[in-house]
Image (cartoon, helix red, strand yellow):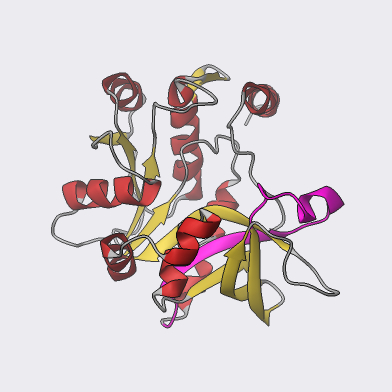
């Protein structure tokens, strides 16, 4: 399922079995397929590069493989998704053929493939190390919700920011838009290698936001503004929402 795409871009999808709020999450059935397979299908529809699912459980491995996608086993003790995808990268591409790595979270089964493609756009600028996504916040409650991570950025154009900070606080202060960060990343390979070699930083630990490690180390993160936040499946209620969305789209003939 990986023909006809650029060899320089690799989509890595980390999947962890040990979810506290939704045990066995990657295998949760959504419209007749395990959630992790639905995510891989969205990545396939994005048509940006070779797709590898990075797992830590044999049953997930088997489910992904039987659906026809590439899969690699990784250690179960990784602290973060970026550590998992880096281990997967060293296993599946030891010769360094892939230049750009897109990290698509394994709990985004309804993500629009165009949203995955959008994460590549900021890397058209050679000065950018890491690219990610954001959407303008319209719900007033989200502006003060610490679970909604905000991007504080300097506008480069109508649809791009240069990230200065990420925070769970309501920021920046004053009149103007606030932006909800979407945790999908595209890395230059060297940037990912550098990032995982760094120790967790002071602000990263304080805010519990891994991307601050990169900013504190002087790496440049640019952020593409998109229209919608993809549904992350963290709870049984989220799972029901995802089932409704994908059942409706499959019934509509997609």
Residue 140 position (above or below residue 170): above
| 8 to the left or right of 234 | left
Image coords of residue 58 (percent x, y): 26, 22
Residue 42 position (above or below residue 66): below
Residue 158 position (above or below residue 79): below
Q: Does the stretch in magenta take in 134?
A: yes
- The single residue placed furthest to the left in the displayed view is 95
Where is residue 189, by image quadrant? bottom left
Where is residue 2, by image quadrant? top left
| Residue range corresponding to the magenta coloring | 127-149
- 7 or 96, which is in the foreground? 96
Image coords of residue 20 (percent x, y): 49, 26
Image coords of residue 9 (percent x, y): 35, 59
Question: Looking at the figure, which quarter contains the C terminus?
Answer: top right
Residue 160 position (above or below residue 225): below
Residue at horizontal 47%, vertical 20%?
A: 23
Residue at horizontal 75%, vertical 65%?
A: 178
Q: Does the stretch in magenta take in 114?
A: no
């Amino acid at each position: 399922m990986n023909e006809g795409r650029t060899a320089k871009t690799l989509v890595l999808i980390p999947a962890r079995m040990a979810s506290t709020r939704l045990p066995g999450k990657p295998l949760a059935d959504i419209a007749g397929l395990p959630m992790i397979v639905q995510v891989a299908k969205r990545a396939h529809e994005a048509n940006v590069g070779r797709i590898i699912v990075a797992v830590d459980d044999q049953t997930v491995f088997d489910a992904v493989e039987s659906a026809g996608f590439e899969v690699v086993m990784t250690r179960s003790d990784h602290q973060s998704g970026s550590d998992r995808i880096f281990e997967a990268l060293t296993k599946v591409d030891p010769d360094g053929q892939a230049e750009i790595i897109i990290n698509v979270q394994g709990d985004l089964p309804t993500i629009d493939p165009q949203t995955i493609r959008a994460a590549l756009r900021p890397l058209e600028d050679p000065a950018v190390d890491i690219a990610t996504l954001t959407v303008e916040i319209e719900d007033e409650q989200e502006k003060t919700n610490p679970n909604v991570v905000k991007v504080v950025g300097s506008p480069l154009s109508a649809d791009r920011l240069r990230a200065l900070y990420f925070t769970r606080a309501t920021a920046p202060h004053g009149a103007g838009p606030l932006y909800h960060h979407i945790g999908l990343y595209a890395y230059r390979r060297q940037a990912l290698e550098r990032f995982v070699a760094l120790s967790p930083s002071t602000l990263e630990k304080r805010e519990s936001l891994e991307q601050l490690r990169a900013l504190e180390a002087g790496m440049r993160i640019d952020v593409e503004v998109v229209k919608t936040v993809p549904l992350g499946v963290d709870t049984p209620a989220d799972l029901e929402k995802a089932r409704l969305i994908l059942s409706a789209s499959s019934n509509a003939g997609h």
